[in-house]
Image (cartoon, rainbow, N blue to C red):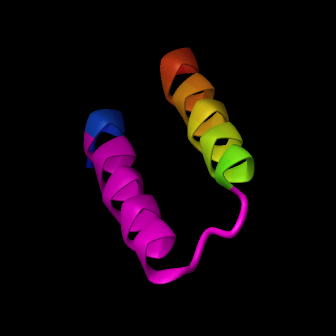
């Protein structure tokens, strides 16, 4: 599997996890998305 496929799979999994948990702190959620965006940008 190529790196793009792995990133895509991780994206889908993270979205699923985030939808299954209740996010009480909007800022924390935004921070997580920001960090994940940075990780993706480095690859």
Nearer to me, 5 or 12: 12
Nearer to me, 28 or 11: 28
Image coords of residue 14 (percent x, y): 46, 61
Relative horizontal placement of residue 10, taking residue 41 as reference (left or right):
left
Image coords of residue 6 (percent x, y): 35, 49
Relative horizontal placement of residue 7, taking residue 17 as reference (left or right):
left
**Secondary structure predominantly adopted by residues drawn in magenta:** helix
What's the residue at 26%, 49% (across, down)?
1
| Magenta residue span | 5-25
Instruction: Count all numbered tags in the image, as a single digit.
Output: 0
What's the residue at 39%, 61% (across, down)?
15
Relative horizontal placement of residue 1, taking residue 30 as reference (left or right):
left
Image coords of residue 4 (percent x, y): 29, 35
The question of residue 14 being in magenta is answered with yes
The question of residue 6 being in magenta is answered with yes
Relative horizontal placement of residue 31, taking residue 30 as reference (left or right):
right
What's the residue at 61%, 24% (across, down)?
38
Relative to 7, residue 19 above or below: below
Question: In terms of image quadrants, where is residue 42?
Answer: top right
Relative to 19, residue 42 above or below: above
**From this viewpoint, which residue is outermost toward the top?**
42
């Amino acid at each position: 599997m190529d790196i793009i496929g792995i990133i895509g799979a991780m994206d889908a999994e993270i979205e699923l996890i985030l939808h299954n948990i209740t996010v009480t702190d909007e800022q924390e959620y935004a921070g997580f998305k920001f960090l994940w965006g940075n990780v993706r940008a480095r690859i």
